[in-house]
Image (cartoon, rainbow, N blue to C red):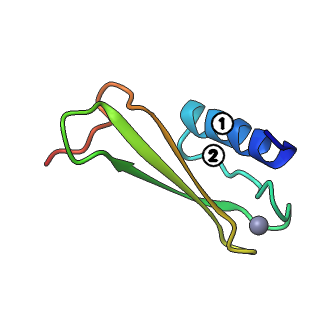
């Protein structure tokens, strides 16, 4: 695992703690990440967290367990 991947994992933890937090991009450090949370389209209690830098366009997707109440109504 390289250091950038480790940084993205830190980002994922911050998003899990507070989905509305503003997180600097771990790639360029100049922009903030847009956060899109997409529940899985089935009964799996998981969500894909899409992180997209508005400055350099770096993106990453992290899959994690959904919090209670986070899954969107179908
Ligand atoms: Zn960036």
Residue found at x 26% / y 33%: 44
Image point 24% across, 44% down: which residue? Answer: 72
Question: Which residue ends up furthest to the top in the rendered image?
Answer: 68
Which quarter of the frame holds ligand 1?
bottom right
Disc 1: CA contacts within 10 A as few (<14), some (14-19) or many (>=20): some
Q: Is residue 27 above or below residue 22?
A: below
Dot 2 beta carbon under 8 Å from ligand 1: no
Instruction: Look at the numbered discs 2 and 1 and tell me whether their residues touch, using CB distance below 8 Å.
Output: yes
Give above or below for 13 relative to 2: above
- Per the image, label 1 sits on a secondary structure element best described as helix
How far across and down, in percent of the image, does residue 67 sit? 38, 27
Q: Quadrant of the N terminus?
A: top right
Kindly report which numbered mark, 2 or 1, lies closer to the viewer in this rendering.
1
Is residue 5 rendered to the left or right of residue 43? right
Which residue is under mark 2?
Answer: 21
Q: Residue furthest left?
A: 74
Residue 3 position, x and y percent, is 86, 43
User: What residue is drawn where x is 17% and y is 45%?
Assistant: 73
Other residues around mark 2 within 10 Å, as few (<14) / some (14–19) / many (≥20): some
The tag on residue 14 is 1
Q: Which mark is residue 31?
A: none
Q: Secondary structure at mark 2?
A: loop
For residue 33, side relative to residue 18 (left or right):
right
As measured in the structure, the alpha-carbon distance from the residue carrying label 2 to the one carrying label 1 is 7 Å
| Observer-nearest of 50 and 22 | 50
- Residue 2 in the image: state x and y as whole percent: 83, 43
Which residue is painted at 69% across and 67% down in the image? Answer: 58
In the image shown, does 24 or 5 lie closer to the viewer? 5
Q: Is residue 17 above or below residue 48?
A: above
């Amino acid at each position: 695992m390289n250091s950038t991947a480790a940084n993205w994992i830190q980002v994922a933890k911050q998003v899990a703690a507070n989905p509305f937090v503003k997180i600097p991009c771990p790639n360029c450090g100049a922009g903030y990440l847009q956060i899109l949370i997409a529940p899985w389209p089935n009964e799996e209690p998981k969500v894909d967290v899409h992180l997209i830098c508005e400055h350099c366009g770096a993106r990453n997707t992290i899959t994690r367990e959904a919090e209670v109440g986070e899954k969107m109504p179908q």
